[in-house]
Image (tube, rainbow, N blue to C red):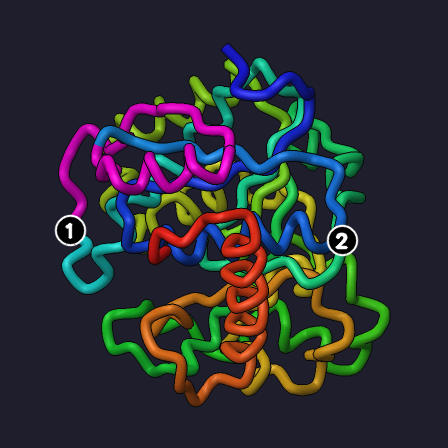
């Protein structure tokens, strides 16, 4: 059953209250930029009661989904967040909607991007879903990341000479490592696609090679068959410093606060974009107080 009576929705996953401050800021940001579409929170049974109550208090639509994991354990001890990420594949099964755009809860929308709701997809062809490339520069120099995660393999490096041309459309999806970032996915739900995904999820030998959970699966299963979006739709906070040639503060539509720390964990940060999050969240808290909501979230 549909959580809201509309064929097109934004959706985000919430498995615990750790990301609840981010989600509330994301929802507020979507409303602030005048999006015509609602945000649905896909929650699992692991979400604490106080998290569900906070969503209910703010009239944010919710839908319970099953926690999704591969058939065999894949060790993500270095990045425990990836255990939750498999469940971000569940929206492919939400066939009650004709368009679902998945957003990570550690994002804020700075400009209206409703145009993505009408983006052409072709689940039988080479536009199975749309996404922005992952930045594979590994600017934090994480030792456990693959050795081929270097700037020369990064799709964004290829856009240095044409930054304005590539704002909305990214490099070809197969460029470099051909890896999408799973933070924003534009999808047309399909039982056929979902069944294909689940089949891979139940293939131990394949899953063993997926260092980045859901985005590894999607990038591999649909290699060269996804539509590349420009970075402005999924502007990774690290890109402002490692891709200054293409980054433009005024063009960014959606900021993705990848890695730690998250903005809500510490008001002081070396990352310039964290101040945008706090401006958004401060406005949210003030607006909520005006209508009597002051539950500490």
Which type of secondary structure does the marked residue at label 2 adopt? loop
Pointer 1 and pointer 2: residues touching (CB < 8 Å)? no
Residue 174 is situated, as x and y percent measured from the top left of the image, at: 61, 53
Q: Single out the mark in the foreground, 1 or 2.
A: 2
User: Quick one: 176 or 228, which is closer to the camera?
Assistant: 228
Majority SS type along the magenta span = loop
Q: Residue at x 50, y 29 (%)?
A: 61
Residue 37 versus residue 4 in the image, above or below: below
Q: Residue at x 19, y 54 (%)?
A: 76
Left or right for 147, reference 231: left
Task: Give the residue at mark 1.
Answer: 75
Instruction: Please give left or right for residue 246 compared with residue 202 in the image.
Output: right
First in sequence: mark 1 vs mark 2 = 1
Label 1 Cα neighbours within 10 Å, binned few <14 / some 14-19 / many ≥20: few
Residue 134 sits above or below residue 5 on the image: below
Q: Of helix, strand and loop, which one carries label 1?
A: loop
Magenta region, residue range = 46-75
The structure residue drawn at horizontal position 50% and vertical position 77%, both measured from the top left corner, is: 274
Is residue 180 in sight in this rendering?
no
Query: Which disc, if any, is residue 112?
Result: 2
Q: Which residue is the extreme one toward the top?
A: 1
Q: Residues within 10 Å of mark 2 (few under 14, many from 20)?
A: some
Residue 105 spot, x, y in % from top left = 45, 52
Q: Nearer the viewer, residue 257 or 47?
A: 47
Picture coordinates of residue 64 (x, y %)?
36, 24
Q: Is residue 236 visible in the rendered structure shown here?
A: yes
Q: Position of residue 297 (x, y in %)?
A: 37, 55
Question: Can residue 45 be found in the magenta stretch?
Answer: no
């Amino acid at each position: 059953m549909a959580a809201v009576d509309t064929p097109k929705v934004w959706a985000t996953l919430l498995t615990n209250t750790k990301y609840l401050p981010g989600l509330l800021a994301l929802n507020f940001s979507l409303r602030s930029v005048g999006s015509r579409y609602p945000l649905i929170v896909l929650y699992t049974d692991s979400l604490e009661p106080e998290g569900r109550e906070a969503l209910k208090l703010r009239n944010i639509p919710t839908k319970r989904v099953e926690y999704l994991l591969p058939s065999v354990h894949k060790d993500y001890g270095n990045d425990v967040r990836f255990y939750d990420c498999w469940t971000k594949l569940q929206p492919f099964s939400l066939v009650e909607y004709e368009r679902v755009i998945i957003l990570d809860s550690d994002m804020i929308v700075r400009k209206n991007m409703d145009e993505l709701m009408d983006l052409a997809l072709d689940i039988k062809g080479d536009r199975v879903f749309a996404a922005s490339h992952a930045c594979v520069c590994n600017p934090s120099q994480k030792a456990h990341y693959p050795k081929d995660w270097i700037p020369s393999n990064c799709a964004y490096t290829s856009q240095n000479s044409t930054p304005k041309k590539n704002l909305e459309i990214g490099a070809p999806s197969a460029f470099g490592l051909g890896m999408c970032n799973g933070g924003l996915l534009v999808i047309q739900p399909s039982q056929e696609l979902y069944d294909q995904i689940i089949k891979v999820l139940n293939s131990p030998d394949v899953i063993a090679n997926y260092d980045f959970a859901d985005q590894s699966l999607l990038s591999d299963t649909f290699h060269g068959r996804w539509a590349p979006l420009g970075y402005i739709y999924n502007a990774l906070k690290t890109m402002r410093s490692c891709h200054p040639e293409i980054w433009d503060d005024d063009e960014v539509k959606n900021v993705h606060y990848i890695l730690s720390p998250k903005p809500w964990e510490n008001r002081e940060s070396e990352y310039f974009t964290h101040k945008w999050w706090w401006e958004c969240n401060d406005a949210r808290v003030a607006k909520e107080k005006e209508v009597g909501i002051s539950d500490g979230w």
